[in-house]
Image: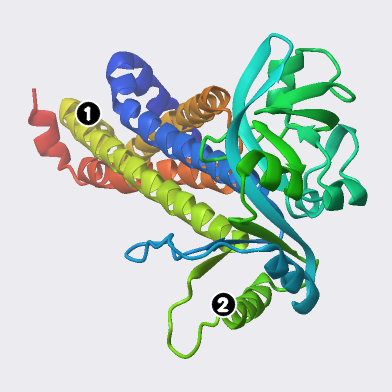
Amino acid sequence: MLYEAIKLARQSILRNALRSFLTVLGVMIGVGAVIAMVTIGNGTTAKVSADLAKLGTNMLYLRPGQFGPGRANNEARPFNARDVEALGAQIPGVRAVAPMARVQATVIYGGESRSTTVGGTDDNYFITQDWRLETGREFLDGEIRGGRSVCVLGETVRGALFGAGDAVGRSIRVKNISCEVIGVLTAKGQSSFGTDLDDIVLMPLRTAQRRIIGNTDIPAIYVSARDGVETAKVQTDIERLLRERRNITGAKTDDFTVRDMKQIIETQTGATTVLTALLGAVASISLLVGGIGIMNIMLVSVTERTREIGIRLAVGAQDSQVLSQFLVEAVTLSLTGGVIGVGLGLGTAWLASGGLQIPFMPDTATVLAAFGFSALIGVVFGYFPARRAARLNPIEALRRE
């Protein structure tokens, strides 16, 4: 009986091919939109997480002043070298503490020049940022203590100044001083905020402070926690120590900010996950519209084929056979739209992933759910027209012209 119902449904669909295509179009668009939106959202979330991870693992970022909604204050005094030493010596669970003093400056080699970020720091910076060198070496202890004019280049700066050539061992001009290139960082690319992480020149902190920046202030400190140590506990210890060192007592507001990169990553990925779910929910509405279209066309089909239904009932067809015939036809339409929609959604997501430069991350559960929902739509929205056809009075149906 099922085979006959499928055969009759196929004949009916092919007999009205254009109408059948327009009927399944809504389901196609709905399934395709849900799969495309969720896949693109998953890729975006993964890219945001990966980009934020480039800024460091188990890392906390310290800066003077309070920043955030309703509490912007950058008038607080900066950190100093003794603060950096105290954080490394007195906070348990700390892997590395790296100072950072930045300034925008022009670097020159031969006839090439580039305006870039020049940062003064030490070797702990490479640890806190999980940043390795492509060629060359890190700073030596004597270079850090003595303030020697050496530097490590980011890949963007190296490419701008030396092209395909080797930079290590060459001397460049940073602002008004000559600086020997001792290393080149591995490329990290852009962050999720659009910043080129490789557009940087690193120098020993004392060199940058005395000869480039002109003061001994430390506007930022990076702290990396040891593996297995909760960054929340490290953050609490840092805040307690800094309040003590900066003479902040009682209910006084902190004049510094400590940000946990793990919290920032969770916030960003949480936001993109919610947005993905919202887009998927909006796209799923078109599935309901497609289901309504199927019910509408099936009602029209029942009306058009009333005499045919009457003849079948008159020669002995059972109500269940008529019901299954129209129900199978509705499910076939919705499943056809679902299959095409899956291909359409995955293809659209793949093209968008290439254009947006995000990972192509289809979710099997979402694909199966969208396809299953399309089948459910065929059953739900096809049942009423099928039941109406099965309940037709054969005598009244035969009288229809």
Nearer to the camera, 2 or 22: 22
Residue 304 in the figure: left or right of residue 353: left
Instruction: Give how far across and how far down residue 321 sits, in percent.
Output: 36, 41
On screen, residue 339 above or below 126: above
What kind of element bears circle 2?
loop
Near mark 1 (Cα within 10 A), the count class, few <14, some 14-19 or many ≥20, is some
Ranked by sequence position, the earlier of labels 1 and 2 is 2
Q: CA distance from mark 1 to mark 2?
A: 81 Å
Residue 253 in the figure: left or right of residue 141: left
Q: Residue at x 59, y 40 (%)?
A: 103
Nearer to the camera, 377 or 140: 140
On screen, residue 63 above or below 380: below
Q: Which residue is mark 2?
A: 246
Residue 391 in the figure: left or right of residue 213: left
Residue type highlighted by circle 1: Ser
Near mark 2 (Cα within 10 A), the count class, few <14, some 14-19 or many ≥20, is some
Specify the quadrant that holds the C terminus: top left
Instruction: Give how far across and how far down residue 336 sits, in percent.
Output: 44, 29
Q: Which residue is mark 1?
A: 301
On screen, residue 112 above or below 4: above
